[in-house]
Image (tube, helix red, strand yellow):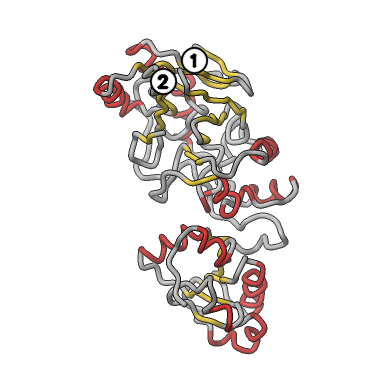
Amino acid sequence: MRELSGGDCKTWLAVSAKTREAVLVDPLLEQAAAHLELLRREGLRLALVVDTHTHADHLSAARWLRDTAGAPVAMHEASRAAAVTRRLADGEVLSFGELTLEVLHTPGHTTDSLTLRGAGALMTGDFLFLGALGAGRLDLPGSDAGRHFDSLAKLAHLDGALEVLPGHDYQKRERSTLAAERRENPVLTPRGLDAYRAWWDQRKQGPADWMKAVVDANLKGSLDAAGIAIPKGAAACACAPAPTPGHGDAEFPHLASTDLARMLAEKRKLTLLDCREVSEFTDELGHVAGAQLIPLGELPGRVAEVPGELPIVSICRSGKRALRAAQALRAAGKDEIWVLTGGMLAWNEAGLPVER
């Protein structure tokens, strides 16, 4: 699978090596001509265009590619988009030479959201993002947290080695694995439906008027963005930050290892508090460079040693003690506290550097 757009909005290309048939997933109107030229140069035939859902932040190239290249346009059968020529059902399998793509209906972000599974990957659209971003916002018309909760259950039996290829990413990431997302993505944290709905309620922003206009344009198959002021650089499909659901820790946001590593690389000023025992600080897991060690049992008497003017990231082996440390810090009057998801176990699994 290859990503073609190079920006926050992702366009994925799947190719059959045997037949040279190509499938474009979520193509952008502004880049459609460039995509066709790339296919021509590489001797590929555009066999299918798939939109994973009705987009709210950019114009789809589906109709243009249909009219210009004669490519069929596929969406889930719940879609009302006028450009669609092939409507897909849950469980349907698309075949192109040796390449097969299974359709999973994964509503929640929109009623017509689908995920494609094939070639060792999941192309998730806005159903599932990477790391702390969670998933596409659920405050658009047709969004529903309960349906999203049910859709996530379809991932439970899937192989953790599958790559996750989202429709958007605003953190300069491109892909992950399902195993990593199970550790780091807040929407995959185990919890009940009521807790999940409550968590999403905290993230509601209400769609901007321009997003509604984009949805209407994509339903009509518009090829003209005139009159639609799409802001540049806006993380439009991401939601407002909110705590990770479940486990009684709803007041504390979680931070994935890869996101913490990125923040440190960007020289973000943070207080890293490691609340493990002294012997663990230099064991085989090591510690994050710059971390301050205060064992959890000593924290109540030493909380004054923790700088309060910077955001605090609480760290332990797996995340449980870090949560208790965060609760102690909050009780002592500290404000901005994050818990490192999966602790040093997840940090090491991600292959990130440690000190011992």
Q: Is residue 145 visible?
A: no
Q: How many angstroms separate mark 1 from mark 2 (CA)?
A: 8 Å
Give the crowd class for mark 2: few <14, some 14-19, many >=20 residues within 10 Å.
many
Q: Earlier in the sequence, mark 1 or mark 2?
A: 2
Residue 339 falls in image quadrant: bottom right
**Residue projecting furthest to the bottom:** 301
Where residue 90 sits: x, y (%)?
63, 23
Q: Residue at x 53, y 70 (%)?
A: 285
The residue positioned 68% from the left and 35% from the top of the image is 147
Rendered image quadrant of residue 89: top right
> Which residue carries the number 2 mark?
62
Which residue carries the number 1 mark? Answer: 84
- Residue at horizontal 58%, vertical 78%? 280
Do we see residue 248 in this rendering? yes
Between 148 and 284, the one lying in front of the other is 284
Q: Give the position of the N terminus as an image quadrant.
A: top left
Asked whether the beta carbons under mark 1 and mark 2 sit within 8 Å of each other, the answer is yes
